[in-house]
Amino acid sequence: MKPVAILLAALTGWAAATLNVAAEDKVRVGLIVTLSGPPAVLGGQVRDGFNLAVKTLDGKLGGLDAEVTVVDDELKPDVAVNKVKGLIERDQVNFVVGPVFSNVLLAIEKPVTESNTFLISPNAGTSNFAGKQCNPNLFVTSYQNDQVHEVLGKYAQDKGYKSAFLLAPNYQAGKDALAGFKRDFKGEIVDEVYTPLGQLDFSAELAKIAADKPEALFTFMPGGMGVNLVKQYRQAGLASIPFLSAFTADESTLPAEKDDAIGFLGGANWAPDMDNPQSKAFVKAYEAAYNSVPGTYAMQAYDAATLIDSAIKGTGGNLSDKDALRAELKKANFTSLRGKFKFGVNNYPIQDFYLVKAAKRPDGKYETEIVQRVFEDYVDHYASECAMK
Amino acid sequence: MSFALLAVQTLNGVQLGILLFLIAAGLTLTFGVMDFVNLAHGVQYMVGAYLAAMFASWTGGFWGALALTLPTALAFGLALEFLVFRWLYDRDHLSQILATFGVILFLNQGVKTIWGAAPLSVPMPEALSGSIPLMPGLLFPVYRLALIGVGLGTALTLYLLINRTRVGMLVRAGATNAAMVSALGVDIRRLFMLVFGFGAMLAGFAGALVAPIVSVEPGMGDNLLILAFVVIVIGGIGSIRGAFLAALMVGLIDTLGRAFGPQMLRLALAPAAASQTGRALAPMLIYILMAAVLFQRPSGLFPVKQ
């Protein structure tokens, strides 16, 4: 009996394998995001935003049944590379969506795009891929990283602030943030302070700000660092100095910052109070499903899903003609939650940017709200270096 | 660089030192008395902060949260002792490090599973919110002043407890020669358990105290654990007095170095180079201090007599 059983098992396995190959009416998406450590909040928003879009489309993308595989990059580039190779070779995905962090994007771009799989980044948008190393298989649904910081610099300049104090963690993204702010801000930089990554207590820096009396503070303190800075800034009685920031008081940190962040300013390409029907429906559905307010991370992931949906529809469900699929992606023929959206030559978005303000809603939850538009149809500064058409 | 700024930064340094002392006190007791390397001390601090956040949302205030956190942190420490650490006292340091490191991983993941990865916060008690002008133009948060007061009170209490009570005497004796204390008819295991639970409670107390000013998040104790080890090594392992002085030194040097290092360097270097060097040098200062102290006094400032 034994050999027969083995033979039977082998036959069933073979049959299943052939059936799988035959079932091409399915689109496979690999979602690679950070789900370990404190940044898991951001990865969770991307995952939930993407899944919500698929759910809204009845489990389909472009009319094909969608199979979404979620993997955790652990915020480690080497782990991420292994995981995307698994997605491409084992799971045979048609699209890779991710990651959250720029250093992971730098690592996975090559393995994904060289296998002629499309990489849709729902958050990270580094300058190299916007410029000289732009890639026809990479599409970014967020922004070029510098742009969010440029919003605050432009606002500070327009507002006529004569001096600003800059504060960021001592790593590449922190330095980029301050450079982005300084692009449009021409006032005096009172001081530029870099703190060790992960610093929890800002009392020394806050005392310095109080002594320097700048007209505004610009800072980039993502995650828990932002929570600490916001609370301590308020406690130190400095709130009369305008608090301009990026990724410091947003939907990922506001639940912890609460009232301390109210009135603090940020820059974004969208906010949950965006006034258009698709965005309102999205925020409502997201809050019902996940019991938290969606941030730009979730919005950009939702847009990534509807972008894929539109491209597959455009090719009539044909996933094997990569050139046609690429052309359809580039058209960006979908209804973005932020309203206007199109791709530039470098496959980075051309979109509006807003000044946003942290606020408490009547239902007691916290969100960012749009104050004013700062940039219209804003193209990033690296697009001109991209040789693609 | 005015006198007022210097004064405020000094207070900031003292406040950081006090916080470090609260964490290092428990660590130095377990390390010194029990010869037990407890890497999990930092996560006990984190658990204290999480408990405070949870109780604050139940009771709606800081004071209720603090009152509930202390016994719970004690119970939690005793449970850890009973389940894990008790089996490690007779093993070598490597086994202790491996096991307590495992506890770190387990608890960091555990709080994430229970409370989620997003940072939590604890409301500041109404009476201590806001800041008072210490000098014209420079404000200092009331809560941080209160923190300094509480820390000094704790230090004094600990000092009296260890040097003036019978239990304190046994603890000191246990630190010098555990086998002899045991031979004299003292249940050394129970003493160890007591010391351990007390250390865990101190860590939880520190966690609950800082919860209103920093975010409560997974892994928040890991960085402080390293600083706490620096403190107890400088102070002399097992010495509360050493831990207190070393914590103040580390807090002051770290804060003042960060605040004034770049300015001092600017006297000698170009501004850009000065800020670059200052930025790189400031986080190193406490380790340089540690190396210097160890060079002069290999067993720390106040070595426990063997």
Image (cartoon, coloured by chain):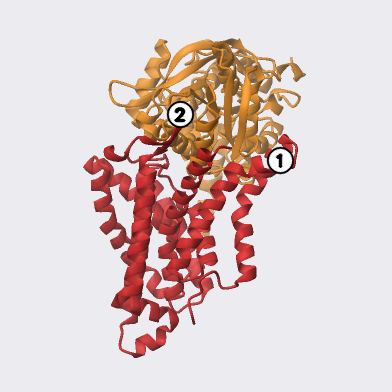
Identify the residue position indicated by label 1 in the image. B267
Subunit bearing disc 2: A
Residue ID at (60%, 72%): B298
Subunit bearing disc 1: B
Question: Do tag 1 and tag 2 residues touch (Cβ < 8 Å)?
Answer: no
**In front: label 1 or label 2:** 1
Give the amino acid type for the residue marked by disc 1 in the picture. Leu
**Do callouts 1 and 2 point to residues on the same chain?**
no
Closer to the camera in the image, A335 or A175 = A175
Q: Quadrant of residue A232?
A: top left
Instruction: State the SS at label 2.
Output: loop
Give the amino acid type for the residue marked by disc 2 in the picture. Ala
Query: Chain B colour?
Result: red
Closer to the camera in the image, B82 or B124 = B124
Judge left or right: residue A362 versus residue A335: left
Identify the residue position indicated by label 2 in the image. A249
Question: At which x and y percent is residue A5?
Answer: 49, 57
